[in-house]
Image (spheres, grey):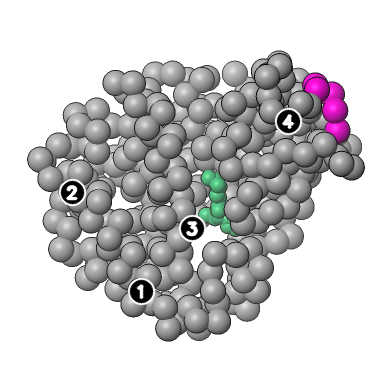
């Protein structure tokens, strides 16, 4: 397998999710630091516009979104599995909880508590990006956001009530990583987090177990190395287009793919894969050659380009 590049920055909670997956599987990877705010030209030349953090690259294949990053790491490196005891559907479905319901109050608390100390460029970027955050009343909303963070933390604590080591029982899984990363973000960025989370006594020992997944073997890389790796590689064969797909698109058609939540930057390309699990587009840029950009099916809108 070609080298794994993770395009990310250290403070990113979704990148922490991906780093823990890499650690869980004990993989070596190259770390490409990307800017915290737009523009991110070294990233978007690979993705065709997708700007969220993180993005995983293996040769000329570019994987957007941690939901697909989990599936792809599992496909390429099945052991140890992120989905023990038949937990794949449950673990993937839980992203709808962790990435939205649990993440959003933590992100609001982080932004609302630290707004004064953050550079204007970061505030302006996230105002435009996080469409779920009401920046006009963020400070006034802090108590409500604290209640939401605690209500979700309580769900995790309750799941650990019988002193099981991991959320699904004795075996660690992607479910642990999903539930962990919003807490990691809150503890790192919200001064009140330790007090807010103190009543949940089972969390800290479980969080310590998840932290022991580690981050794998990380070595840093310049963006130019990642671009050269894309230039030199040929993308993996696509998964084809499902004949029964309700959109009625055909392989090779020009399409546009857009996240359906926030950061709705469209990516254009030629359709390579359209299944119930994945969307992939081929695109070309002289700086990186021909690449295939992959997205999960959940949470992304696909349309015929020019339709
Ligand atoms: N659904 C995406 C969400 C990723 C996401 O929202 N990442 C945040 C940072 S943790 C982001 O992109 N922030 C803006 C940025 O990095 O430019 C995933 O699972 O990867």
Image quadrant where one finds the C terminus: top right
Task: Check contact, mark 1 vs mark 2: CB within 8 A.
Answer: no
Residue at the (30%, 69%) spot, across then down: 147
Q: CA distance from mark 4 to mark 1?
A: 40 Å
Tell me if mark 1 has few (under 14), some (14-19) or many (20+) residues whose alpha carbon lies within 10 angstroms of its own.
Answer: few
Task: Indicate the secondary structure of the residue bearing disc 1.
Answer: helix
Query: Quarter-wise, where is residue 198 in the image?
Result: bottom left
Tell me if mark 3 has few (under 14), some (14-19) or many (20+) residues whose alpha carbon lies within 10 angstroms of its own.
Answer: few
Secondary structure character of the magenta stretch overall: loop
In this view, the mark in front (3 or 2): 2
| Mark number, residue 158 | 2
Task: Where is residue 75? Give x, y as percent.
Answer: 51, 20
Q: On the image, numbered disc 3 is attached to which residue?
A: 11
Q: CA distance from mark 3 to mark 2?
A: 28 Å
Segment colored magenta: 250-254
Task: Check contact, mark 4 vs mark 3: CB within 8 A.
Answer: no
Q: On the image, numbered disc 1 is attached to which residue?
A: 144
In this view, the mark in front (1 or 3): 1
Tell me if mark 4 has few (under 14), some (14-19) or many (20+) residues whose alpha carbon lies within 10 angstroms of its own.
Answer: few
Is residue 193 or residue 144 the one in the foreground?
Answer: 144
Tell me if mark 2 has few (under 14), some (14-19) or many (20+) residues whose alpha carbon lies within 10 angstroms of its own.
Answer: some
In this view, the mark in front (4 or 1): 4
In this view, the mark in front (2 or 4): 4
Image quadrant where one finds the N terminus: top right
Q: CA distance from mark 4 to mark 3?
A: 38 Å
């Amino acid at each position: 397998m070609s080298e794994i590049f993770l395009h990310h920055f250290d403070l990113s909670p979704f990148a922490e999710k991906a780093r823990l997956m890499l650690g869980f599987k004990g993989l070596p990877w190259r770390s490409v630091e990307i800017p915290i705010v737009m523009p991110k030209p070294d990233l978007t030349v690979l993705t065709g516009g997708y700007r969220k953090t993180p993005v995983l690259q293996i040769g000329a294949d570019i994987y957007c979104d941690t939901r697909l990053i989990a599936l792809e790491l599992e496909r390429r490196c099945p052991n140890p599995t992120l989905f023990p005891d038949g937990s794949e559907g449950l673990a993937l479905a839980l992203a709808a909880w962790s990435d939205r319901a649990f993440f959003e109050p933590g992100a609001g608390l982080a932004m609302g508590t630290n707004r004064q100390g953050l550079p204007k460029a970061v505030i302006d970027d996230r105002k435009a990006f996080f469409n779920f955050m009401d920046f006009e009343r963020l400070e006034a909303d802090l108590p409500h956001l604290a209640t939401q963070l605690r209500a979700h933390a309580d769900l995790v604590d309750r799941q650990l009530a019988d002193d099981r080591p991991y959320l699904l029982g004795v075996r660690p899984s992607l479910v642990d990583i999903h539930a962990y990363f919003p807490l990691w973000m809150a503890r790192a960025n919200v001064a009140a987090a330790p007090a807010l989370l103190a009543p949940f006594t089972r969390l800290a020992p479980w969080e310590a177990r998840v932290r022991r997944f580690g981050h794998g073997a990380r070595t840093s890389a310049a963006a130019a190395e990642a671009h050269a790796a894309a230039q030199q590689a040929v993308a993996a064969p696509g998964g084809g287009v499902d004949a029964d797909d309700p959109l009625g698109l055909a392989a090779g058609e020009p399409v546009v793919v857009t996240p359906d939540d926030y950061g709705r930057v469209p990516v254009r390309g030629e359709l390579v894969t359209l299944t119930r699990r994945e969307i992939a587009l081929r695109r070309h840029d002289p700086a990186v050659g021909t690449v295939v950009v992959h997205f999960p099916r959940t949470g992304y809108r696909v349309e015929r380009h020019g339709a």
